[in-house]
Image (cartoon, rainbow, N blue to C red):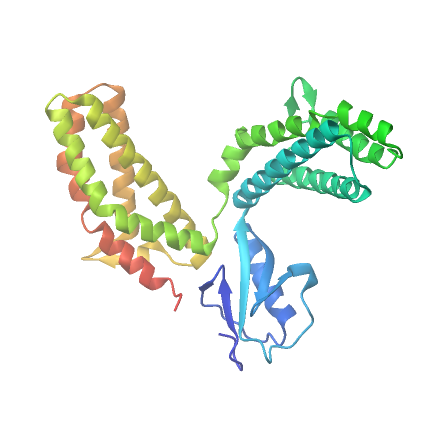
Amino acid sequence: MVKGCHVQVLINDYPVNFEFENEKNVSDIVHSISDWSRERDLIFYELYLDENLYSIDKVPDAGLDGVGVINCIVQSKADIVISSIDEAARYCDRASLFIKQVIESGTCTGNDIEDLTSGTSWLLEVLDRIMGLLGHAEHGFRHKDRDISHYIDMIEAFRDSLSKGDDVGRLMSILTDHGDLFLEIKHIFKMFLLSDAMRSLIVQSIDSPDVLITSLVRTRDEFPAQLSNIQAAAIAYQTGRDFEGSEGLKRFVDFVYRYIRTCYQIVPVFRIELSEVEADGVTLEDKNSELRHLLNEVITVMENNDIISLSDILEYEISPALGKLDTFLNLLLEKISFK
């Protein structure tokens, strides 16, 4: 809540405690949340004033009187890139289908060409934004032995040529010459998703608060199944069913990796220290350190193909180490205020 009024501030639909002091209008709130987002390497791009949606550069200069809820929509850089690529790929499919239909029918309206022109300009903006977020320069990423700049030039030339298609014959020639252009661009976007820069961004990006909360709840809810899973894996190794044990171990490693990554991000996003979350004299920081140490042991014995030691670690060390992890997660969720 904001002092002196009844405005509730949300982040992605979740109430989160903020210490607002001198904010008098909506733009003050936007400024504070923008600073909060930048500190956490998040992108704050739009908000709802009650039911009305605004981009943050078009927020009305209004007081807080009469506003009940300010819902701020933020995403990590990785979220922005992935959603933008998905949207751009869908547009490329629609543009390719449109060009095919026009060539087959031999007819097209001026409004259709205007829409294609504006859509192509939008596609260029998305491409530029994604390259910026990924750290790609036009000459730093190649497709079919050509720089991305080559394809940007092709898109720009196509867009500019549309305005010169003043008769049907010329327009059909332009569309025919560029019939595969949007499929090429879609392929480039998909390649971005598989790039080292994208993998690095996913690892480094801090998730938004609602994603982190959802991840913690998911981890807590999956905990009983993972405890049973690791116990079953130990039995599988002990009885010679190595493949079954290996599959169970992979699921467990993915589970722990996702959990540890979420915990790393809890500190900067919610300003909660894991050393402050304690149960029976053990802190969550100590618990996580123990889990990381045991995973390193597991990796070592797997590399040495020491199945006996592996099954012993799973049964006698990891299973006890997982004890009460759900208790810690409940305590952590209690510290995250979203009432």
Return the x and y of residue 87 as percentages of the image width and height: 59, 41
Count the labels in the image: 0
**In-front residue for pair 52/299:** 52
Q: Most extreme residue toward the left, as rendered? A: 239
Q: Is residue 97 above or below residue 51?
A: above
Q: Quadrant of residue 136?
A: top right
Residue lying at 32% horizontally and 49% vertically, measured from the top left: 218
Q: Quadrant of residue 250?
A: top left
Q: Is residue 62 above or below residue 156?
A: below
**In-front residue for pair 106/201:** 106
Left or right side of 248 for 215: right
Q: Quadrant of residue 167?
A: top right
Return the x and y of residue 236 as percentages of the image width and height: 14, 27
Residue lying at 13% horizontally and 35% vertically, measured from the top left: 315
**In-front residue for pair 181/37:** 181
The quadrant of the rendering that contains the C terminus is bottom left
Return the x and y of residue 226 as percentages of the image width and height: 23, 41
Q: Most extreme residue toward the bottom, as rendered? A: 4
User: Does the image show residue 121?
Assistant: yes
